[in-house]
Amino acid sequence: MTHQNKITFNKLYRYFIIAITGKETEFTTGSIRKAVFMLSIPMILEMMMESIFAIVDIAYVSRVSVNAVATIGLTESVITLVYAIAIGLSMAATAVVARRVGEKDLKGARQAAMQAILLGIAVAVSIGVVGFLYSKEILALMGGEPDLIAEGYGYTKLLIGGNITIVLLFLINAIFRGAGDASVAMWTLVLSNGLNIILDPVFIFGWGPIPEFGVMGAAIATNIGRGTAVVFQLGILFFGWSRIKLAVSDIVLRTGVMLNLIKVSLGGIAQFLIGTSSWVFLMRLMSEFGSEVLAGYTIAIRVMMFTFMPAWGMSNAAATLVGQNLGAKQPERAEKSVWITGKYNAYFMLAVSLIYLFFAPEIIGLFSNVTSVVENGALCLQVVAAGYIFYAYGMVVSQAFNGAGDTKTPTKINLIAFWAFQLPFAYLAAITFELGALGVFLAITLAEVMLSVIAIIWFRKGYWKKVQV
């Protein structure tokens, strides 16, 4: 190693330590590349923890049965509707908190954080009651066969019934990210998913006095892991080291702040509901081809999440940078941050796409030895990975709109890409033209490419710089 390289390595290492310990939360001045690095590292590690858990979870469940894997696929296609609401609220929380932090208004940031949490609790409890009472009906509606429903309804009941842990985990981490405390969000996910990975085999296969719960055990482990992390988050918010420090006196309904959050979040919720309802339709379409095809698709999606999550981490960094810099009245710095983040994301996604294109069967084969499952999972991985570079820019630009509080623009783009194009194309290709699962995979790739191109064109127009939140 040359002297110059040693200096560069030492600097990167020092930045890395600062990033994961959260010692720097001000990103409206100084080097943009350094700001992207400081925010991206904990966010990437945070999302990688989520994706590692997804992989480990499906690896354990695949040892139970094909029906167990398919149950997770059907349940998660429904639970993504919960994610849509959680992410929509989270985008509003990040946008408003980041803007207030950029304006140096920490009291306003604190008030926004509390109203977001109260709103999240109300929504999650409502959804949880429905999921707990009607789990069998939900699986039947999604096309689950009777034996699948009998084996898997307990998983669906507990996961949707306990969705408050999902909503609050997303929401409070979004508050931390908006405040620039990305490292706190990272350590929360380390705790949550670390517990999930340890508890998964205990509850799925049984251990000591704990009986074997099968696929339902995965839901028990998930709720315990996420629930513990939420308690940890609340402890930090009320007693810890975050820039946002709440007090018992903050637990009051502030109508003006709440309505502003709802206004900003509606676009985000609609944006993700469009994408996730499309996802539900695709999963329903896949169920027409049998449990083995559905299982292959589910495994492929989990594997892709392993790489999508770090990419989303970088995208979340762009959202925080845009929010804080717009609050500090620096729109040009906000825009430059987005293009730099997009470039780094594209390098990462290109490397991943090459691995998937060349080694898809071997990767899917790690999770199943059923030939049909491996063939369909590998095909999905290869077709979807072909558009990864487009996704890299598309997700960063979309999150940049959201970070600015302009949630309406990505909503319109999603409406065009998913409802106007993806759904009709998937049905025609898979059913009418009899391409089967391949038709669905092509629809996913082409819709994401379309979304990315439209997002970049609209982002360049610059209207997002004038949005007030």
Image (spheres, rainbow, N blue to C red):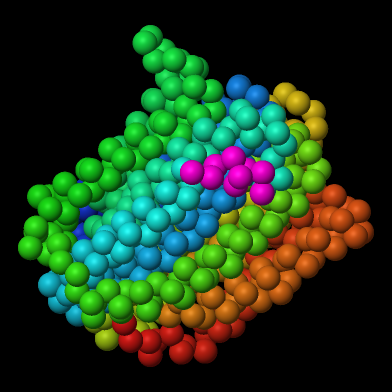
Q: Quadrant of the C terminus?
A: bottom left
Residue 350: image quadrant is bottom right
Q: Is residue 168 visible?
A: yes
Side (left or right) of 30 relative to 415: left
- In front of the other: 128 or 220: 128
Residue 282: x %, y % from top left: 70, 55
Residue 220: x %, y % from top left: 42, 31
Task: Please state the extent of the stretch shown in magenta in the rendering.
Answer: 133-141
* In magenta stretch: residue 43: no
- In front of the other: 114 or 316: 114
- In front of the other: 82 or 183: 82
Residue 247: image quadrant is bottom left
Residue 290: x %, y % from top left: 79, 38
Q: Is residue 450 visible?
A: no
Instruction: Count numbered badges in the picture.
Output: 0
Main SS, magenta residues: helix
Image vertical order of residue 68 relative to residue 211, above or below: below
Image vertical order of residue 284 relative to residue 407, above or below: above
Residue found at x 15% / y 62%: 251
Residue 207: x %, y % from top left: 41, 13
Residue found at x 30% / y 78%: 259
* In magenta stretch: residue 136: yes
Residue found at x 56% / y 62%: 392
Side (left or right) of 371 relative to 337: right
Q: Quadrant of the N terminus?
A: top left
